[in-house]
Image (tube, grey):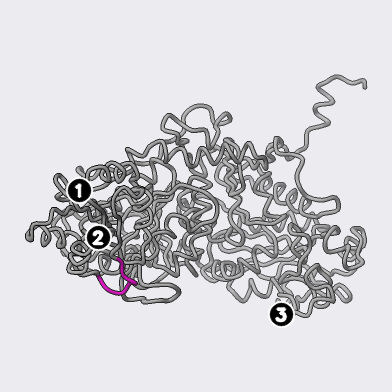
Amino acid sequence: MGGSPDISKKQLDHPLDDLIRTDRLPHIWCAGCGIGTVFSSCLTAIKASELELNNISMVSGIGCSGRAAGYVKLDSFHTTHGRAIPFATGLKLGNPDLNVIVFSGDGDLFAIGGNHMIHAARRNMDITVICVNNLNYGMTGGQVAATTPHMAKSTTTPSGNPEDPFNLPLLAYASGATYVARWTMLHTRELTSSIQEAILKKGFSFIEVLSPCPVNYGRRNKEKALDTLKLYQENTIIRNDANPAGLDIDFSKEVVLGKFVDVERDTYIERYEKICRQES
Amino acid sequence: MKKAILTGEHFFTGDVACAEGALAAGCRFFGGYPITPATEIAERMASRLPHVGGSYIQMEDEIAAIASVLGASWAGVKSMTATSGPGFSLMMENLGLGICTETPCVIVNVQRGGPSTGLPTQGAQGDMMQSRWGSHGDYEIIVLAPYSPQEIFYQTITAFNLSETYRIPVLIMTDEIVGHMSEKVIIPDSRKVKTISRTAPKGRKDRFRLFEPGPNGVAPMPAAGQGYNVHVTGLTHDEKGYPVMTVDTQVEMMDRLTGKIRNNLDDIIMTESYMMDDAEIVLVSYGVSARTCLAAVDQARKSGIKAGMFRLITVWPFPEEEIKKIAERVKGFITVEMNLGQIHREVQRCVGGKVPAVLVGHHGGTIIPPEDVLKKMKETF
């Protein structure tokens, strides 16, 4: 319809196309899912960081968010369930010049991979971990997770979740992470600059991103996709430097977002160079 | 920087010889987790690696250890880990990731008695079938079984060379006895140590296909950071590395993963024959049990029995054709191993009932005395 082919091509181009494996589209994420928005923020942050793209690697585990590594046009590794962080640790130690970003989900990073998460934070491994938290296991159809709110319904908690969820920023902070933040996927500007900051910061950086799963979580908890976004808009408050102990997620009250930790500490590699390479 | 290759004569345990073999092979990353009787390999690497330009990290468990090894390998570094039964079990899932993503690395299992926590301080050879089939799905694997500290040194180099040649995790299945015994280990001049590194890709980066096989069935391998934008996944993938969930892609990928081993058996399989020329009774063994067999063959020969030993240096892929050929000219086989008959079943399968094939096995915990083998010889033949 009218216009030269050049113009129509230009209209079709997406500003992040050079960072996306366009030959792998369409992606698998459902309509209403927030992972794509988080992914897009992450790519925008990578571009804005002005880092040499060849030196950036993305590592994912298994799950919906774990598919991110399959769409990014960087060196990308889709590993086993829960093991993105130890894989990333080896990658970073094998070549300390690499900037390694772990992009994965709450189930992958905090249930099956929880042990790796706390240890990588403890040793201050210089990687950035972005955790898309959709409060359940989406890929397998909506089972209860370590992040599912108390009494929320899932396919494996049909009467409501009897357990309490983790407070992810508190866990990251207590484990020794030097950068800890939480955003929702609706807060794209804050999220994007936070990811950029985390990527450029040395040390273990952790960002939790709340993201809707209308198909599996919302449907069972009387929360339509738009309802979740309204909660993100109306029931959140940005409170930088908030005490990580007060960050439990309760959307019936107020969910605190912001950057909670930004401190300096020697990284694992810095200490290894200083201490372990000393000739005795 | 200190020397990576300690040329000279040493008195080393098998575990230390293994670590020194790895360093000589060019290994520069070790992701470890302590476990008896493999801990000494980690300890040696922890003290040596930082001074030869490598790194050691003690991970939070064996799952993390092998995951870090795979990650380091994709950074372009020759990498390894070492463990024993319980840790080996934990490594099985990521062993599969290594096979599926064609990631070179070396995993050492210093075997101890099992199942479960078993006999941590005593030797066994009970993980041999696990070394073949322990990870889920079909695959081929390369497994070596050294029988002395000196041989561990050389086989660790060979393990890295095979791993780099075929882009596959290679397992060294030793045991507590060989791991903890001290013997003379001669480390040659560094110029005499032959090492192989993965083939680097050539040509245009944008046309590079991560799993497109070269002439020997193995694809060249770039490292992260070199501009190839590799995508590496444990999902069934095409030659580009992209996940494709179709039967055709599964068949093509599996044929590639198994073909690169099955079509190169002559290069991979190593065996050793002792007094086999005129042997009528063949002892098939590997690892520490081969030491039993050496004594048993000598004692049998003294009493006029024509015995010989066929030693498996490569246990997997199994030297099927060799066993079949031997079966045509001998009176029988005795498999000697510290388990209740794992490789024995393979020998039986290859012999195919042509001649008797029996087992001298042990539940694990102690080396099999040569007398048990002699007794079996006299009973059966």
The label number, if any, that marks residue B17 in the structure image: 2
Q: Which of marks 2 and 3 is in front?
A: 2
Evaluate whether residue B378 shows in this view: yes
Q: Is residue A51 above or below residue B69?
A: above
Circle 3 packing at 10 Å, graded few (<14), some (14-19), many (20+), is few
Give coordinates of residue B210: x percent, y percent.
54, 37
Q: Are marks 2 and 3 in contact (CB under 8 Å)?
A: no
Where does label 1 land, which residue?
Answer: B273
- Subunit ID for the residue under disc 3: A
Residue under disc 2 on the same chain as residue under disc 3: no
Q: How far apart are marks 1 and 2 (CA)?
A: 24 Å
Q: Which of A28 and A258 is in front in this view?
A: A28
- Subunit ID for the residue under disc 2: B
Going by the numbered disc 2, the residue's amino acid type is Ala
Circle 1 packing at 10 Å, graded few (<14), some (14-19), many (20+), is some
- Secondary structure of the residue carrying tag 2 is helix
Where does label 3 land, which residue?
Answer: A245
